[in-house]
């Protein structure tokens, strides 16, 4: 079991990894060895994820979520397959932890203070006077 948070754990059997050749630098190694990882996790049908967390995770996933509800995470930053596997898993856990975090409290509406209103009006009056000085008066 992989621990996402204290109350959320996912089974390793729910994760599916595909390996492919990575693009970019890496010399001959990049042409021979399949080091890039594509981690698949069926987010929509996972019994481990609560409904509220699932909804937020689907929103956070964006383009990485397929129409079937499968989350696809790619990792190819490193030259070794093992480091890329760890990187993909960390990306998945980070996304799920962010979705599991409680939403921030609603903003409480407040009125501007008397001082801030006065400063705003003084600034507007100053700007108006500056612009008035720029105007060309009638020529005589």
Image (spheres, grey):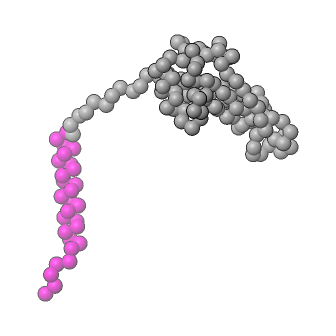
Q: Position of residue 64 (x, y in %)?
A: 59, 35
Using the image, determine if residue 83 lies above or below residue 114.
Answer: above
How far across and how far down the image is residue 70, in percent? 61, 28
Of residues 101 and 138, the one drawn nearer to the viewer in this rendering: 101
Main secondary structure along the magenta-highlighted residues: helix
**Figure quadrant of the C terminus:** bottom left
Q: Position of residue 102 (x, y in %)?
A: 43, 22
Kindly give the residue lying farthest to the front in the view shown: 68
- Residue 86 occupies quadrant: top right
The residue shown at (46%, 21%) is 52
Apparent side of residue 115 relative to residue 1 in the rendered image (left or right): left
- Number of numbered labels in the structure image: 0
Residue 25 appears in the figure: yes
Q: In this rendering, does residue 94 appear at all?
A: no
User: Which residue is drawn at the image coordinates 57% and 28% (left, top)?
Assistant: 69
Horizontal and vertical percent for residue 19?
A: 76, 32
Q: Residue at x 76, y 27 (%)?
A: 82
Closer to the camera, 113 or 41? 41
Q: Which residues are magenta?
A: 113-140
> What residue appears at the point 20 percent right and 59 percent down from the top-left corner?
126
Residue farthest toward the bottom in the current orientation of the protein: 140
Q: Quadrant of the N terminus?
A: top right
Q: Is residue 80 left or right of residue 2?
A: right
Q: Is residue 136 magenta?
A: yes
In the image, residue 16 lies in the stretch drawn in magenta:
no
Occupied quadrant, residue 23: top right
Which residue, as the protein is rendered here, is positioned at the far left?
A: 140
Q: Of 24 and 132, which appears nearest the observer?
A: 24
């Amino acid at each position: 079991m992989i621990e996402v948070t204290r109350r959320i754990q996912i089974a390793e059997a729910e994760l599916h990894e595909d390996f492919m050749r990575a693009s970019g630098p890496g010399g001959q190694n990049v042409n021979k060895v399949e080091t890039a990882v594509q981690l698949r996790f069926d987010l929509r049908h996972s019994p481990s994820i609560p409904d509220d967390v699932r909804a937020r995770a689907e929103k956070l996933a964006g383009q990485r979520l397929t129409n079937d509800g499968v989350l696809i995470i790619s990792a190819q930053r490193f030259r070794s397959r093992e480091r890329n596997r760890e990187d993909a898993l960390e990306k998945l856990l980070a996304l799920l932890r962010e979705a599991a975090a409680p939403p921030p409290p609603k903003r409480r509406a407040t009125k501007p203070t008397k001082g801030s209103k006065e400063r705003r009006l003084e600034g507007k009056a100053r700007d108006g006077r500056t612009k008035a000085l720029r105007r060309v008066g009638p020529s005589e």
